[in-house]
Amino acid sequence: MPQSDLRELFVDELKDLYSAEKQLVKALPKMAKAASSEELKEAFAEHLEQTKGHVQRLEEIFQALEESPRGKKCAGMEGLIKEGEEAIQEDYEGAVKDAALIGAAQRVEHYEIAAYGTAKALAEVIGESDHASTLAETLEEEKETDEKLTSISEQVNEEANTEPEEEEGEEEKPKSRSKASSGRR
Ligand SMILES: [Fe+2]
C-alpha cells in the first residue's frame, strides 16, 4: 500500500476522532447534570475540560498537516451518546442511575482508547512521530479517565446495592447473595 493511502487513512481517523470529541463536549455536561454522586459529577466536569483540550490537540495536528478537521461524523460516538441519553432518561435513581451513567461513560472511553490507539499507530508508521506523541498524551488521559470511573463505580455500586428499598418495607430481605455472605463494614 503506498504511504499516501496510509496518510489518507490517518487523516480520516483523525476526522472521526475530531467529530467524536466534539460530540462528547456537548454530551458531558448532561451526564454531569444527571449524576448524583459529587465525585462522579466532578469526574464528568473534569473530563469535559480534558476533552476540550483533546479537541484543541486534534486541531493543532490538522493545522500542521494542512488538512481540514471537518467532513466526518463519528457514527460510533453518536450511538454511544444515544445510549448515554437513554441512561439519563431511565427511571433509575441515585446510585443506581450513577452506575448506569458510569457504564455509558466507560463505553465512550473504551471507544476512544481504541480510536486513539489506532491513530497513534498510524502516525508512527508514516513517520509522524510528533503527532504520535500528541495522540499518546490524549490516549493516556482517556485511560486514566476510564480507571477513575472504575474506581468511582466500586463505591457507587456498593451504595446502589445497599440503598434502602422504599416500597413495601422489605428491609430484612437481602438484595443479593453476595451482600448476605460478605461481612459488612
Ligand atoms: Fe478525549
Image: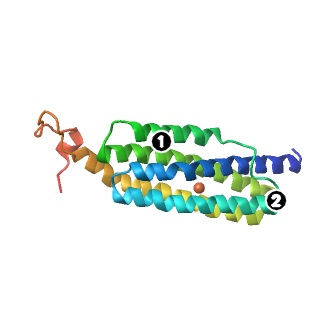
Q: Is residue 48 left or right of residue 92?
A: right
Q: Residue at x 17, y 51 (%)?
A: 183
Q: Residue at x 56, y 62 (%)?
A: 50
Amino acid type, residue under disc 1 in the picture: Gly
Q: Is residue 69 left or right of residue 105?
A: right
Q: Secondary structure at mark 2?
A: helix
Which image quarter is the N terminus in?
top right
Q: Quarter containing ligand 1?
A: bottom right
Q: Which mark is residue 132?
A: none
Mark 2 near ligand 1 (CB under 8 Å)?
A: no
Q: Residue at x 51, y 59 (%)?
A: 47
Report whether residue 102 is seen: yes
Callouts 1 and 2 close, C-beta under 8 Å: no
Q: Which mark is residue 84?
A: 1
Q: By what rule are the colours in the image chosen?
A: rainbow
Distance from disc 1 to disc 2, alpha carbons, whole Å, reads: 33 Å
Q: Residues within 10 Å of mark 1 (few under 14, many from 20)?
A: many
Which image quarter is the C terminus in?
bottom left
1 or 2: tag closer to the N-terminus: 2
Q: Residues within 10 Å of mark 2 (few under 14, many from 20)?
A: few
Q: In this rendering, is residue 15 above or below 66?
A: above
Report whether residue 127 is seen: no
Image spot of residue 53 (x, y percent): 61, 63
Q: Secondary structure at mark 1?
A: helix
Image spot of residue 76 (x, y percent): 61, 39
Q: Residue at x 78, y 50 (%)?
A: 11
Nearer to me, 90 or 9: 90
Q: In this rendering, is residue 144 above or below 171?
A: below
Residue at image mark 2: 65
Amino acid type, residue under disc 2 in the picture: Leu
Image spot of residue 48 (x, y percent): 52, 58
